[in-house]
Every structure is written in C-alpha cells, then in structure tokens.
Amino acid sequence: MKKIIFATSNEGKMKEIREILKDLNVELLSLKDAGLSPDIDENGKTFEENAIIKAKTVMELTGEIVLADDSGLEVDYMDKAPGVYSARFMGEDTSYEIKNQYIIDQLKAAEGEERSARFVCVIACAFPDGEIITRRGTIEGYISKQISGVNGFGYDPIFYVPEYNCTTAEMKPDQKNEISHRGKALRAIHDDIIKA
Ligand code: IMP
C-alpha cells in the first residue's frame, strides 16, 4: 500500500485529513507515526513557501510522498496581518483571548466591509521525484465585534461567517470542516494524489 506522510504532529488535523482522504487507499502517517520530529524553520514569507519548506524537508528525510500545510488568518483592515505569523502573533505564549481582543480593538473604527477577513490554508505535496504541487483553500468572513463561541481553536471566536450567522467557534466541528479553508485545500489536493 502507498504511504503518505502528513508533516504535522497535530492529532486534530490528522483526524480531519484521514476523513477527507479516506477513499485514497493509502497508509496515512503523522510525523509521530513515522517516528520523526524534524526541527523545521518556517521562515517563508507566504503560506505556499512555508508549506513547501515542511513538505520538502520531510520528503528528503524519508523518500516518501509528503503533505504539509500552513494556515492563518488575514485581516484586511490590518494589511492582511497576522497572516503567516498567525501562531506567533503577539508571542507564541500569548493567549488567544488576548490576541482576539487585540484584533477587535484594532478594528474599533471599522464598519461593514472594512471588517473583512479570511482563513487561508495551503497544502503542499512533495513527491519523491522532486515534483511539488500546492493547493490553496480559503473561507471568507468578517471580524466580529465581540468574542463568541467555544468550539474550534485560535481565532475562531472572532471569525464571523454571514451565511451561517455565527462565528466558526459557534459551529459544530463537522459543519466547520465542510466549509473550512483546510477542508477545501485538502479536497483540492486529493485529486492530484489519486493521479500520482
Ligand atoms: P498552522 O498552520 O498550524 O501553523 O496554524 C497557524 C495558525 O493560524 C494557528 O495557530 C491559528 O492561530 C491560525 N489558524 C489556522 N487555522 C485556523 C482555524 O481554523 N481557526 C482558528 N485559527 C486558525
């Protein structure tokens, strides 16, 4: 059976990935499953660069097909910050309650369309022959005026999706997976893996 490594140690992500790629008939391994803990410097300036750095590093270590993702929140009113720095924004150890309140405060004067934002996810696939492909998924929304919801993680409590009239932290996990940036990018790359 074909092996594919997904370069993450996040079990939540692995669950979502297994679900979306379940019909591929491949053995899908996390870094932990593959016995790897590479020290990767995510110093790219774009989601694409970071996803490629991760996928390529692990492919070169293992010789297997490797998938890797990079994701984050772009707030238009803040010139698309925190972007690729979403996890490190205001310091890795700062709580998301503080980060989320800070973003709300930054947008105090913003109304309507000025509050637009999106979650972005780029998945890179590095093949052993050196070929690399990337696919991007996004979900558009607005920064809410207050923190609400307890599901999800990170910036979910301030990411309002008008079609659902709630934040992504107020959605059930299955509902979020169906419309999420990560789900879209994974479904897009799914067809390329089948062809490989
Ligand atoms: P990474 O792709 O795991 O490095 O995630 C980057 C960061 O983007 C996370 O730590 C969160 O701050 C943010 N992020 C990415 N996806 C989501 C999401 O679905 N909800 C909330 N925050 C997210």
Image: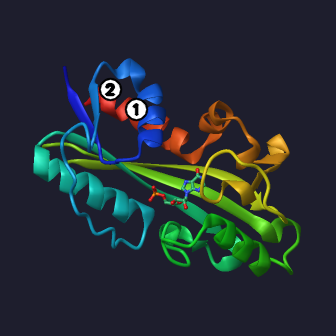
Residue 48 appears at what percent x and percent y? 39, 60
Q: Residues within 10 Å of mark 2 (few under 14, many from 20)?
A: few
Regarding mark 1 in the picture, which secondary structure is present there? helix
Q: Is residue 69 left or right of residue 149?
A: left
Residue 25, placed above or below residue 155: above
Residue 29 appears at what percent x and percent y? 27, 34
Regarding mark 2 in the picture, which secondary structure is present there? helix
Q: Is residue 55 left or right of residue 144?
A: left
Q: Amino acid at mark 2?
A: Ile
The residue drawn where x is 23% and y is 63% is 39
Quadrant showing the C terminus: top left
Q: Are the two marked residues, 2 and 1, in contact with CB atoms closer than 8 angstroms?
A: yes
Residue under numbered circle 1: 190
Residue 33 appears at what percent x and percent y? 24, 36
Residue 131 appears at what percent x and percent y? 21, 48
Q: Amino acid at mark 1?
A: His
Q: Is residue 180 left or right of residue 8?
A: right
Residue 137, placed above or below residue 65: below
The residue drawn where x is 26% and y is 42% is 32
Residue 148, placed above or below residue 15: below
Residue under numbered circle 2: 194
Q: Is residue 173 left or right of residue 192?
A: right
Quadrant location of residue 190? top left
